[in-house]
Amino acid sequence: MAIIVLDRDGVINADSDAYVKSAEEWIPLPGSIEAMAELSRAGYQLVIATNQSGLALGLFDLDDLEAMHAKMRALVEDAGGEIAAIFYCPHGPDDNCRCRKPNTGMLDAIEAEFDTSLHDCYMVGDKRKDLQAALGKGCKPVLVKTGVGEQTLQQLISEPDARLADTAVFDDLAQFADFLLRSS
């Protein structure tokens, strides 16, 4: 079974400059839950890899994060799909950890957990650091224009990075899922 790695905030749910701090604030983006369910039913294992520095900043606690993830899992399950695993980095940007994207520590942990290589797997994000993490692990980077994806795309155009030149760009997770399901 092929793994698809998904960022959370800005890809699956609406992001916030003030951080998503509770299950009530965790609002799925239009079409994202259905897209995840369709990919899951097609045999893809969906794994979430998300930086959650709000934990380190004390904006929410582990129980709040678990409630957000329980809500996300339940919505995907209600739509007929499944999330295989959720990995998160609890550290802040200045903690110099290995797991915070653009570092590949979370991706290393996914490989260990699933006893597989993520090389050539799709990794979907809305931020440059998601794309950089994907490249660092040999994944196929996918940029969605939701969240800060539009700004990321403009940044890639104005500050080209040859390593990111082949990044696939989609309007949202639903459009990516449609593309992948049609082409497989």
Image (cartoon, rainbow, N blue to C red):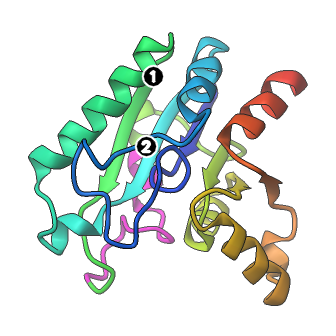
Instruction: Indicate left or right for 69 with 14 as reference.
Output: left
- Asked if 180 appears above or below 63 in the picture, the reply is above
Q: What residue type is labelled 2?
A: Ile
- Where does residue 99 sit, x and y in percent of width and height? 36, 64
Local packing at callout 2 (Cα closer than 10 Å; few below 14, some 14-19, many 20+) is many
- Where does residue 180 sit, x and y in percent of width and height? 79, 31
> Which mark, by number, is residue 110?
2
Question: Magenta segment: does it hold 118?
Answer: no
> Considering the image in quadrants, where does the N terminus appear?
top right
> Considering the image in quadrants, where does the C terminus appear?
top right
Q: What residue type is labelled 1?
A: Val
**Residue bearing mark 1:** 76
Q: Please name whichever residue, 115 or 123, is drawn nearer the observer in this view of the structure.
A: 123
Determine whether the residue tagged by mark 2 lies in a helix, strand or loop. Answer: helix
Question: Magenta segment: does it hold 98?
Answer: yes
Please give the name of the residue rendered at 14% of the width and 60% of the height, measured from the top-left corner.
Answer: 60
Please give the name of the residue rendered at 63% of the width and 49% of the height, measured from the top-left corner.
Answer: 123
Question: Does residue 95 show up?
Answer: yes
Q: Which residues lie in the magenta part?
A: 95-111
Please give the name of the residue rendered at 77% of the width and 38% of the height, measured from the top-left corner.
Answer: 175
Mark 1 → mark 2, Cα distance in angstroms = 20 Å
* Snapshot quadrant of residue 155: bottom right
